[in-house]
Amino acid sequence: MGVGPLGAFAGYVLMPVMNERGLFFRWAILPGNARETWGRDLLDGLPAVLGDRGFRWVQGVKTPPYRVRGGRVVETGWRGWMGRVRNWIETRFSVMVRSSGLHRIEARSYWGLVARVNLILLVHNLIRSRVLLRMAGVEL
């Protein structure tokens, strides 16, 4: 529990940025009631970013087309292949959350939470990059 700019919140949200290899290289832990625009600093200096509809207010993020009042569709330059890439990213993230227990972390302090999240993301990146297999001498 805590109090943020939008009032009381319970829990935190992980806002990760994944590269084309499926590795997390930037992330932030924000209050549970955070808006997507709060994470815009994570996107600085990136050449291309795909996001969901919540990121349509963040400059430089490609989002799917969306409807406004009256039913008018706003085109965003979204291409069909972008949806498949976003689906792959969402799948990778949900597998990581389920397999590592990220959705049920218990910590006694904020810094304990940060340490556990960093450890889980590190393990994911090590497994995904196959560094551990190379260290063990396994050739792929």
Image (tube, helix red, strand yellow):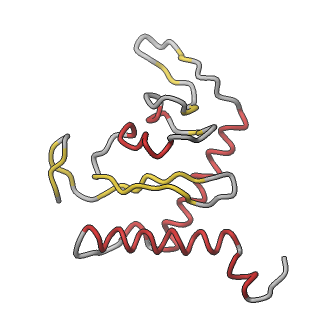
Horizontally, residue 114 falls left or right of residue 140, namely left
Quadrant placement of the N terminus: bottom left
Q: Quadrant of residue 10?
A: bottom left
Q: Position of residue 44 (x, y in %)?
A: 50, 40
Q: Position of residue 137 (x, y in %)?
A: 79, 88
Seen at 43% across and 52% down, the residue is: 15
Quadrant placement of the C terminus: bottom right
Give the answer, above or below, for where 77 lies relative to 1.
Answer: above
Seen at 46% across and 75% down, the residue is: 119
Q: Position of residue 73 (x, y in %)?
A: 54, 16
Give the answer, above or below, for where 106 lies relative to 4.
Answer: below
Which is nearer the eye, 28 or 91? 28
Q: Residue furthest front?
A: 45
Q: Position of residue 100 (x, y in %)?
A: 49, 74
Seen at 44% across and 69% down, the residue is: 118
Q: Quadrant of residue 34?
A: top left
